[in-house]
Amino acid sequence: MIDFGLSDDQEALQRSAREFLGAECPPALVRDAATSDDGVPRELYRKMAELGWMSLLVPEKQGGLGLGTLELALVCEELGRVAAPGPFLTTQLVIAALLQAGTAAQRATWLPKLMAGEAHATLAYLEESDRHDAAGVQLKATKSRTGWTLSGTKLFVPEAQGADLLLVAARTKAGATGVSLFLVEPAAKGVRVKAQQGVDVTRKLGEVVLKNVVVPKDALVGTEHQGWPVLARLIDLAAVGIAADSLGGAQRTLEMAVEYAKVREQFGRKIGSFQAVKHIAAEMVADVEPQRSLVWYAAYAYDHRPKDAARAAAMAKASLGDVYSRTARRSVEIHGGIGFTWEFDLQLWYKRAHANEIAYGDPSFHRERVAELDGY
Amino acid sequence: MDLTYSPEERAFQREVRAWLKANVPKKDKADNPLESADKARIARAKVWQRKLFDAGYVAMRWPKEYGGQGADVMRQTIVNEEMVRARAPQLLGGMGIQMVGPTLIGHGTEDQRRRFLPKILTADEIWCQGYSEPGSGSDLASLRTRAEIVGDEFLINGQKIWTSNAQNADWMFCLVRTDPDAPKHRGISYVLIDMRSPGVTVRPLVQMTGDPGFNEVFFEDVRVPRGNLVGQLHDGWTVANSTLLHERNMLASTTRTQQILDNLLRLARTQQRNGKPASKDPIIRQRLADLAIKVETMKLESYRQLTDALRKRPPGINASVNKLVTCEINHQLARAAIELMGDYGWLGKKDARVRDAGVWPNDYMFALGLIIGGGTAQVQKNIIAERGLGLPREPRPS
């Protein structure tokens, strides 16, 4: 039986997330976080943890909500709708890594703090080459008697500034199967986190320099040399999360345009009565509305259709990247001059759309993946 | 959310697949355009629909008493998917099955349903749509074909235009003006006209594709029994809108779009470009993946809308979005095919070296026709903006 809709519980989660964030995450909070060093709105994150969002993916017997990627996507959509700052998604990626490949000891050390919103985490895999494949991982990890020594530089690390824990992809051997994943604390000796200036003011972006950083044996997540498939799967999860965020953001920028077109008057008429404006708005609806299905499916496939998960994530990421940017741009156009100002909040979404389009693989990258997976 | 088939559904899927494998005519695959002037092809299309009907695969969701299967939506979905897979030919009776049929189920009398529905399914009676007139295109409600009530009959005079497949049709569902003094939306009635009635003249119009796919239809003192009125007298606009909604859904069918995508991918893998398959060209790959994503999105969207419908949630302006988006994708698919073929892309459909039996140059034109037909893209955008978003209506001159 095809039942391609949300359950009552999922709809309730969606509603409560929308209400909560509508009240707790106004644009003023987003702007405040932007001016802070680490970009983490701690009070908001504490409340999100109380709602159980931080532990959404964690099985119930480990103290979490035991929900799936679809629920995660619903929360991401609502966070995107309010352009919420901070390391929610990045932390979820590391939690997913721990659940998937971590040892019991790693989970015992980190899960309680991450679930409580007391610690935040992110994934550091890209380097100067900006290659999104295994060959891009060149940061070196050398094995010693007591553990590992890591040296190299990671770039484009989302929320690096607010992270208490980094999951670092490192090269332990030449070739595609030579990638391993390590837990690294930014507080460790030899780690330096520097801000990169990203275009997206709602989120932070950082550079992580590791200089002879010594980590113990049990910092290794998963099997030595076998980190790439784990990482690839985490990037798919990131793609689904960002796609969902983009859906919420696109929907919000569309709504803002429509609200404005209903009140703004020119030539003695509401501008929304002109077909030139109406048709832009209609195109935004036609663009955005069907995307929900793509996001839902990518989230569903991630948990339930392993063979189709990568393809569905790539499709959602490529499509939502385009659609969010296009929708935010159209919204700015409908707003006219006011939409172009720093003061008016729409710029927050326009910039987030820009970042979402590129983070975790841009649309061309993911379209090529679809072509590859479908055997063109 | 659950997208897995039950064991019964899987068994049904196997059954349909096997049946299609044995029965889809080799000659008329889906990518072969159905031309109205090709009488032999029209005859084969009727045979094909009859065969499909006998197997129980046409309009499966219709109630049993009218010749349907009373089947659930899953079975219909499985049949649709398998038809794509098997490249089964299009149905000739689409206007009957997808437009007037559902309208009669919703607004017709019991007599009308029993009289007309079974023959729609078997393709014994083919239908056409009498909506547009020379002076009434997007402003459909301004139509002027008159129907006077004389005794137990309507006496019809006037003209329809762009009437697809009228030359092969047995019946027409038609909008006529029954009250010229009422405001334009309130003086219209919806009647069913036997195309063999005295006074009906069909004159084919040649489309851009070269096929006389649509027609002008003239009515000169055509007599139609009162019993052929659908819905209330003067309330044809309500009924017409119901049909228009069904039409948008038909034009937005993702089944056909998936077939076109499959054909495009097949072409891209075989057509050489710079000495290698076009599908290996990085720019073409981007294009194909982009289209594959769009088609997948609309397929999933149809599942979501189906689920909403089963949950009795109002469809809103979905049909307009579907029509707008899907017809645009169909055109883009043909456009991509034309572009990846290089010089083979500007061969006409009858050239000996044309690829895929000339379906692409034909589709490149035909798909544009469907962006206009069934309510232009611009009309759909007005509907989405005004009814969907609540933007102020266009000021209407009284």
Image (cartoon, coloured by chain):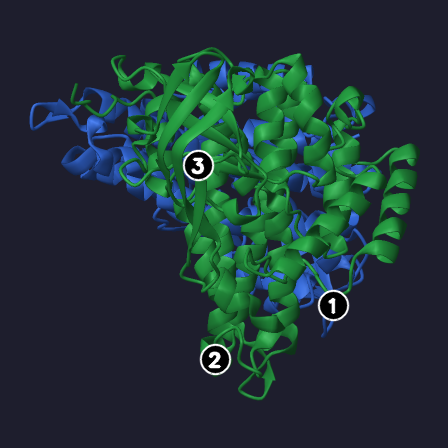
In three-dimensional space, the C-alpha distance between marks 1 and 3, rounded to whole angstroms, equals 82 Å
Identity, as a three-letter code, of the amino acid under mark 1: Gly
Closest to the observer: A105 or B306? B306
Left or right relative to A188: residue B88:
right
The quarter of the rendered structure image containing the N terminus of chain A is top right
Question: Would you say the residues marked 1 and 3 are in contact, meaning their CB atoms lie under 8 Å apart?
Answer: no
Residue for badge 1: A178
What's the residue at 49%, 18% (across, down)?
A: A18
**Helix, strand or loop at mark 3:** loop
Residue A151: horizontal and vertical position, in percent?
A: 59, 64
- Is residue A122 something one can see in this rendering? no
In three-dimensional space, the C-alpha distance between marks 2 and 1, rounded to whole angstroms, equals 43 Å
What's the residue at 79%, 20% (across, down)?
A: B65
- Give the number of the disc on residue B199: 3
The chain letter of the green chain reads B
Tell me the mark number nearer the camera, choosing from 2 and 1.
2
The chain letter of the blue chain reads A
What's the residue at 37%, 49% (across, down)?
A: A198
